[in-house]
Every structure is written in C-alpha cells, then in structure tokens.
C-alpha cells in the first residue's frame, strides 16, 4: 500500500534530474511512514491521497534532517544520520530541497490543505526552536512541555489527518483531534523509551534526552515529586554526561515514584480520546494504529 | 514605499506571538530589499503586491540564513551574521520558520504565483547545493557556473518579477526575463566585487570566494587564458588561504588578461537584454535598477 507513496516520492526527486540529490536521498531512512499511513487510512488509496502522503513524508523527512543537525544526532533509527554521513551542510541543503519540493507540490492540493500543512510546518519549526530553548534550563513545567511536543511532533500529524479527511469529505475536526492526540502520545511514548530502553534497542544511549538537556515529562514529574534536596541533586545532573551511579539514582527514583506508569497513563488517555473522536467512523486500521501505540508494557 | 513591506513582515512575525523569534529577527539585516522593489515597481503598491513582496523577502532572508551557515559566513552586509551571533542551530531554525511562514502566506496568492515562487525555492536550494559541490574542485566550466548562479540567485528574482506581472496583468514572460537576467548579472557583479573591493568595503577579505573554493567567472576565464604551467599554479592556490604574493599574482594576471572587464561586459550584456525585454513598458524605476547595476567602473 505504501509502495505507491514511495514511488511518488522517488518520482518527485527523479524529476529534479540531479545525480547528487538522488544519491543523497538513497541514504535517507524511510521510517515508519506513519503520516502516510494516517492519510491513506483516512482518505483511502487514490491519486490525491498518495500525492498528499508523499508530500507529508517529504516534509517530515526534511524536518528530521534539520532536527538531526540541530540535535547533533549521529544516528537515526539505528543507522547513521545524513549529517553524520555527509556533514551538516548537506543535511541542511537536502532538508531545504525536500521542504521546497513538498511546498511546491502542496499547491496542487488546494488552499485549505496547503494552508493546513504549511501552518503545521510553521508550528513544527517553532516547536524545534522551543525544544532547544527549553533544553538550556531544567524546565519543570509540564504545560510548556506538552505545548512544545504538540508543535514539534503532533502539529503535522494533526494537519495530515485533517487534510486527508478534507480530501475524503469526512469529518475533518474529528480526524484532526485523532491526529493531534496520536502525535502527542507518540512523542510521550518516544520520550519514555529513551528511559526504559537500553542503548542497543534504541540506537542511542539511555537517558540521552536528559544528558542533552531535554527534561521530558518523566523528568518533570520526577522533579515535582522529589524533596528539595533531591530536586537540587537532579538539577545538578541536568544537561551533562552521567556516570553509572547517577544513572542508577535517576532510574531508581523514577521507579520509586511510578513515573513511567504515570506518563504512560497520560499518553494512554490521549490515545483513548483519539479513538473516541473517530469511533463513529469504524475505521479498523486507524483504531489499530492507536491501540498498537499503547499496547505495550513499561 | 518599502515601509509597508517591512510592516507586513513584522506583522507576520508578530502573529506568531513568540518573544524569542521576535528578538532573533530584530538582528536580521534588512538588506536592499531588491526583490520587494522589483515586485512593487512591477505591480504597483497595493495590498496584494505588498503581501507578495513581504513573502519574497522572508523567503530570501530564510535562504540567506541557511547560506551563511553553509558558507560559514560570519558577516552579512558588514555586520555579524545570525549564525555568528546566535550559532548555527538558531540560524537554521529561524530560516525554517521564515521559509514556512512564507509558504503559508503564499497559498493566498493563488496557485500560479505559489507554484512560481515555490519552484524558485526548489531551484535556489539546488543552486546552493551545486555551489558547495562545485567548490570542491576547480570548476573551469562557465556554463556550469552560470547555471548554478541562475538557480542560486536569479531564480527567485525571476519568479518575483513573473509573479508581480501576473498580479498586475502585465506581460509576465517579459518581466520574468528581466528578473532572471538582472539576477544573473547581480551575482556576476557581486562575484567581481569580491575581487576588486578591499576587505573593508565588502565586509569580508578580498578573494574570499576563491579561498573558499568558489571559482567564480573571473577565475574560470583567467584559468582559460593561462598557459599550462600557470594553470597549474592557479589550481594549486584553489580553496586555501593565500599569502600576499599569491594574491598579487592572481590580481596581476586578472589585470593582464582584462578579466574583470570581460566579466563586466558579460553582466552588462545581460542587463541590456533585461532592459530590452521590458522596453515597451516604459517603467522608469525598473530601468533605473538595471542601469544602476552596471553604471559603475571596475
């Protein structure tokens, strides 16, 4: 089903008739194509939905290329990132090319969809900026964190679901809520995995986010629970490399206060709300995507 | 006349309601606003043309932000660049924000204009990639160089002139040719100034392009003229810092073979063709922009 989307992306790139870009793009990991799936599952597979899905994935890929430069990430889904392989400059330029192809193709989708998707890119760019800014201090405000991950991760998924529903003449607001909640929950689970997975599974060291200065929801909740002395201890570990003892102390306290479970339940709540929003649609595939996201133990 | 454009840009940014972005953007040099001028001079000052001009300038600013990161440029128009002031990451993110606001606003301009401008951004992104790739060797092919500067610099000016003419119901192809030739000539003159200006005037060291590996038209023509021994000598100086003696040798040979004059005449030819394309329009301001570009001695 996704092969038509892959073909559309390849086609857009082949159209440029540029050897170097073609070569660089073969190194781009394809990922889960979650945004493409959302679109195809909502709007069914047809010429327009395939085009929209290819646009969404090109824009998403562009954002990841720039994110990896900004986060100095040397790996992406367990393989070397483009910036690691070809340097930051190529990653920036390739991102700009994918963004602009995406926007160019978006014009054909009509102004409602074009505005929805391009506004999501504004939001995700701001979300990335906020993510970096928040990393400079120990952010202890869960509201600020949720707003940031909404922008950074969920805004594009929300716009994809909304736009696909517009294409299909379905209830766009319901699907938008589904996409938004799924996106926020997805990022929350991703942030949890940074704590619960070992380095091998995730392709990056455990507690990587905290070392990078990112106080994701578990660290915010942990901080809220600790006494003043331990709050200071945790703050002193922020945004620097941790020795084994420090890592263990964090993990022990996360366990002690049931932080993972608390965060997981918050993500689950969002997913259940997403399912509720589209319950009248009886869309088995969308229900499965949502359920799979929370159908795991931590 | 440009103040309405500045207000439109400020308005788009204020709409985001984001303190940090507002602050970063006050540090962005405004520049000559050449693209805004082209648009306003072609389409006259009205609500639509002002909006298009603000979009073009936001997109142009975004491209410069990323260019400066890619070129490691610490100055822009004699003042410190955003990447120098706030680091590469902020420059990348701010560029992404400006690009996406530009694309979002572009949707309102109708699909012909939106496609023209967004296609130009694809071209300028490819042009930037080509510029970097070409810098790795001593490119001796003037055709490849002209194609690269067309993409990197002229494609957006061409699209601005074309789109403004569409807005005004004027001869879009004629204005597109004007914009394209003006853009190529502009880049050629800019490349000449890197050789003829001293460090103080230009805000960067003389022969900076060559040191960075960029074999602009003068170096290509010089290379073509030199004997084999001197060709090799020139090639050996490529993409590294030059001592005074080496600089003098290059400048002496450029003078000996009248390279500056040859390049200037090529730029002038393009400008005259631009003027010819719009001669029936009797647009005094556009004529002046073109003439001012070549009305100088080298």
Image (tube, coloured by chain):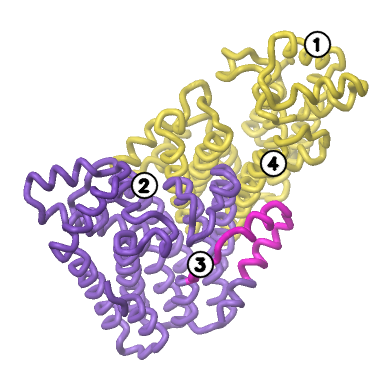
Chain colours: A yellow, B purple
Q: Which residues are magenta?
A: B8-33
Which residue is the site of mark 1? Answer: A252
* B26 in the magenta segment: yes
Quarter of the view holding residue B172 = bottom left
User: What secondary structure is marked by label 4?
Assistant: helix
Say whether mark 1 and mark 2 are on the same chain. no
Please tell me whether mark 3 or mark 4 is closer to you in this view. 3
Q: Label 2 neighbourhood size at 10 Å, few (<14), some (14-19), many (20+)?
A: many
Which residue does the image show at 48% across and 64% down from the upper left? B114
Which label belongs to residue A133? Answer: 4
Query: What residue would you read off at disc 2?
Result: B129
Q: How far apart are the two marked residues, 2 and 1, measured between alpha carbons?
A: 49 Å
Q: Residue at x 41, y 39 (%)?
A: A90
Front position among marks 3 and 2? 3
Q: CA distance from mark 3 to mark 4?
A: 28 Å
- Is A74 rendered above or below residue A48? above
């Amino acid at each position: 089903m996704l092969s038509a989307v892959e073909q559309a992306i390849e086609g857009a790139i082949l159209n440029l008739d540029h050897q170097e870009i073609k070569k660089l793009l073969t190194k781009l990991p394809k990922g889960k194509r979650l945004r493409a799936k959302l679109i195809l599952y909502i709007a069914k597979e047809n010429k327009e939905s395939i085009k929209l899905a290819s646009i969404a994935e090109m824009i998403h890929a562009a954002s990841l290329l720039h994110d990896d430069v900004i986060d100095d990430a040397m790996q992406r889904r367990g393989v070397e990132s483009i910036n690691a392989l070809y340097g930051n400059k190529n990653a920036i330029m390739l991102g700009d090319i994918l963004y602009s192809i995406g926007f160019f193709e978006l014009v054909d989708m009509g102004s409602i969809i074009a505005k929805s998707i391009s506004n999501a890119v504004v939001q995700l760019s701001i979300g990335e900026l906020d993510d970096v800014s928040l990393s400079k201090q120990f952010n202890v405000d869960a509201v600020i964190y949720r707003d940031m991950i909404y922008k950074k991760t969920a805004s594009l998924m929300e716009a994809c679901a909304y736009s696909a529903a517009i294409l299909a003449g379905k209830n766009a607001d319901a699907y938008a809520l589904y996409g938004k909640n799924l996106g926020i929950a997805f990022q929350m689970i991703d942030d949890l995995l940074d704590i619960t997975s070992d380095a091998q599974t995730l392709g990056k060291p455990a507690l990587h986010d905290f070392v990078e200065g990112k106080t994701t929801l578990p660290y915010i909740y942990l901080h809220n629970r600790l006494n003043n002395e331990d709050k200071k201890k945790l703050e002193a570990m922020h945004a620097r490399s941790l020795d084994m003892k420090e890592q263990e102390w964090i993990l022990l306290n996360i366990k002690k206060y049931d932080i993972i479970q608390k965060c997981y339940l918050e993500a689950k709540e969002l997913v259940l709300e997403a399912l509720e929003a589209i319950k009248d649609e009886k869309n088995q595939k969308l229900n499965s995507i949502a359920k799979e996201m929370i159908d795991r133990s931590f």
